[in-house]
Image: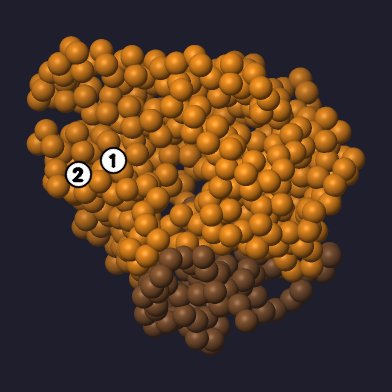
Chain colours: A orange, B brown
Amino acid sequence: MTAEHSAATYGEVVERDVVIVGGGPAGLSAAARLASAGLAVTILDEQPELGGQYYRRPAPAVARQWGDHRPEGGRLIAQVRAAGAECRTGHLVWGVEDDGRTLLASDDAEHPVRLRARYLVLATGAFERVFPFPGWQLPGVTTPGFAQHLAASDHTTVGDRVVLAGSGPFLLPVACSLIELGVSVAGIAEAGRPYRPSLRALGTLGHPARLRELASYAARLARARVPIWQETVVLRADGRDRVSSVTLAAAARPARPVRTVEVDALCVGYGFRPQTDLARMLGCQVRVDVASGDAVPVTGAAGRASRADVYVVGEAAGIGGVHAAKARGLAAAHDILTREGRSAVPVSEARRMMSARRRLARFTALTDSLYPGPAALLATLAPALPADTVVCRCEAVRAEEIRTTAAGSADGDLNATKAWTRAGMGPCQGRECGFAVAGLVRSVMPGRGVGDGESRVEIFPSRLPVRPVPLATLLELAGPESQKGDA
Amino acid sequence: MTTAQGRTGRRAGPGRAPQTEIVVDGDSVQAVDGISLAAVLVGERRWSLRRNPVGGDLRGPFCGMGVCFECEVTVDGRPGVRACITKIYAGMRVETATEGEAPHDR
């Protein structure tokens, strides 16, 4: 039996019109539209329920007792199911076969599944942008997103006395969720200075609803007397086996302490980064976004990637928020339907969609301009990072080792630095430390940086598997030959 | 006493959400039906779930969305289960890996 045969035999091959990876707002919007038009659609998600991060479903017992924080997510999921889309939850898509189009996944029982489709819609979302500081690996230090999930989906508090830090609008709703559960939010440290009277003036540019949302969070925080320390960053976290205090510094002088606060949880995040590993593995072109330093897939108006059969939608195509994510998912669906000759989208609907997306893009640009750009922030924070800070959590690689290697044997090359130090080679594959490692490399070799050209993407390359896969899955995929060990 | 129940829904309205019992490192733990395992553990203020394989220091949940792998525990004998994307069910047996060598560099 040849290797190809065994691979075809072991591991179900699912053939569909459209396979959508990611069951968040973008993937769900695309799935609902495509399935209701009669296409054979499969939507996969790693989590046990659809919804992604934004529409993460509360446990039914939580929803009954305390309510559903985002019922529109539940309605969208119901719509997708009713339209007949095949929903595969608990499925981790971890790679692509050599043919460049068959997706490799493992199901909720860790059995291999292979999927092929005429159109692939990647709605893989985003993950939080974090930046290390001494003590960030202590238990009790988390992302704001974790605190939010605990509060909204599980009705559980991350701590009794909490400081939120980092940058971006997301810190405000998280603080509000915590207050609602009775948590004492000792303060919010924001690296920029976005909150000032001129916010109101900026806000009248055609996005009153979104800014009202931000303003209502701010009002709730003011009522609860939560201090917002602007232009402030985390200097370090301390504690024995668990965080017990956080020390803050002025963003302009990140090495000089200004305040120490006792906490039992500390949540730090700097917004979100697009999750593009699968797009890159499929050979989709990416470009560097100069403001964030992130790789963003090159896409056309409807999310079509550099490969005609692949669409990248939602936050994976660039951070834009839930409304933009849904609009992008829908635009991709319409493009596919038009190519299939299934339904010409009415001109009025297309126009409405285009103008909605332009409006959303303007809002994103406006919000972005309020907060410090991640690349600029990185240039301030990276040089100030103390030498013995653990930067790569997985492999326990410290700042000094990264700087020395980058300036020495790696000669300013990010991937050589990774190879020499092992920073970014652990199970998270550099998702947590990648932003910081890139910043450290750049800080000691300033000649090399983001924006040197489209080909210079300053992030770790996508590798197979994109997530650790159980050995049993791989063995089963390879067939009985490999299990005997003599293939 | 700190229990998951005490940390969840302390300020909730009347009534009581249905509970499920799981076993964590041999201790019986009550928590609201169907919530995430990470929520049960953090609700109990059991933050340390594993030791870092390189430095040996204690680690706990960080990202909450399956990215960082810091919340890996053993569930019903299956190692490497991410507590943050796993829902609890009755009788679930959870083992954390916090025993062993203490960090040498702290």
Please, what secondary structure does the residue beneath circle 2 have? helix
Which chain does tag 2 point to? A
Q: Earlier in the sequence, mark 1 or mark 2?
A: 1
A401 and B88: which is toward the camera: B88
| Most distant residue in the right direction | A256
Q: Which of pointers 1 and 2 indicates the residue nearer the eye?
A: 2
Name the image quarter holding residue A447.
Answer: top right
Q: Is residue A160 visible?
A: yes
Say few, some or many: other residues with alpha carbon within 10 Å of mark 2 (under 14 / 14 to 19 / 20 or more): some
Q: Is residue A108 left or right of residue A452?
A: left
**Residue shown at 25%/12% (left/top)?**
A351
- Residue designated by label 1: A28
**Residue shown at 57%/24% (left/top)?**
A368
Q: Is residue A15 visible?
A: no
Three-letter amino acid code of the residue under disc 2: Gln
Quarter holding the N terminus of chain A? bottom left
Q: How many marks?
A: 2
A1 and A383: which is toward the camera: A383
Please, what secondary structure does the residue beneath circle 1 have? helix
Residue B103 in picture, x, y percent from top left: 78, 69
Three-letter amino acid code of the residue under disc 1: Leu
Residue A335 in picture, x, y percent from top left: 23, 22
Q: Are marks 1 and 2 in contact (CB under 8 Å)?
A: yes
